[in-house]
Image: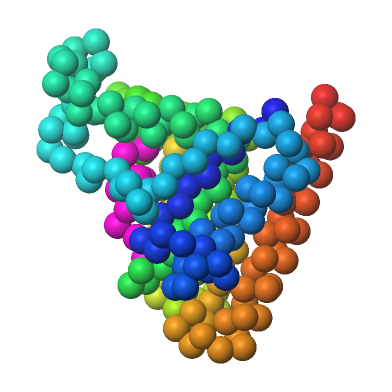
Amino acid sequence: MTRILHLDSSARAGVSGVCPHGSHTRRLSARFVARWRESMPGAIVTRRDIGAAPPSPVTGEWIHAAFTRPAERDGSMRAVLAPSDALVDELLAADIVVAGVPMYNFGPPAQFKAYIDNVVRVGRTFGFDRNRPGDPYWPLLAGQDKRLVLLSSRGDYGYDAPRLAERNHVEASIATAFAYIGIDEVHCIAIEYDEFGDARLAQSIEAAERDVDALVDRLIARIGSTTIDA
């Protein structure tokens, strides 16, 4: 049974094509989940709207609590970490993370950065031992066959090409953080030309939706093949 963690981080509440000024990333993430459920009705989906209810930014108290051994944390430390624990628990339970992440000023929204800071947790998603030979850090989610589907949107165009690739800090920064904790299979699809609002935007949306459908088909086929082999 597939477990999907559906994350949206757009500040826009609606879905493009349905609501005026709606979000393209919400449109793509909703399409992915809907298509998946059509093929696998038994899938369990956990929804987390980071755009509507952003996680709190990391504070000094949070850092102190996170780097204190669990057995030594007092009640106030556990309370500070409780929202982060809930986010980490959702991530640990998921087979596929479907994240709608628009580009804001060349990077992910602050809401999604706060999410990353809350789930990249020492002792929960990555290990640390300063006495460990070689690298003192290691991913705790490695080898669990988890996947990240990153669905983005951009106002301009050419962020996957030489034109503006050096200004794209969305996919690379998110993939780096997820690989650090052990999720290194990442699939990226994006809509461009939003600020132009012309035929090129419509074509980009159509292409992205086709890519989402094809990605769902490929991933489901892989899961079916693995089940048969097992």
Instruction: Give the left or right position of residue 46, taking residue 120 as reference.
Output: right
Q: Which residues are magenta?
A: 107-119
Indicate the quadrant containing the C terminus: top left, top right, bottom left or bottom right: top right
- What is the tally of numbered marks visible in this picture? 0
Magenta residue check for 113:
yes
* Prevailing secondary structure class for the magenta stretch in the rendered image: helix
Q: Is 103 situated above or below 120?
A: below
> Visible in this render: residue 130?
no
Q: Is 149 situated above or below 171?
A: above
Q: Residue at x 80, y 33 (%)?
A: 226
**In this orientation, which residue lies closer to the viewer: 180 or 53?**
53
**In this orientation, which residue lies closer to the viewer: 26 or 111?**
26
Indicate the quadrant containing the N terminus: top left, top right, bottom left or bottom right: top right
Q: Measured from the top left, where is residue 77 in percent x and y?
A: 17, 22
Q: Measured from the top left, where is residue 14 in percent x and y?
A: 46, 62
Q: Residue at x 68, y 73 (%)?
A: 207
Magenta residue check for 86:
no
Q: Is 93 situated above or below 23?
A: above
Q: Measured from the top left, where is residue 65 in percent x and y?
A: 19, 26
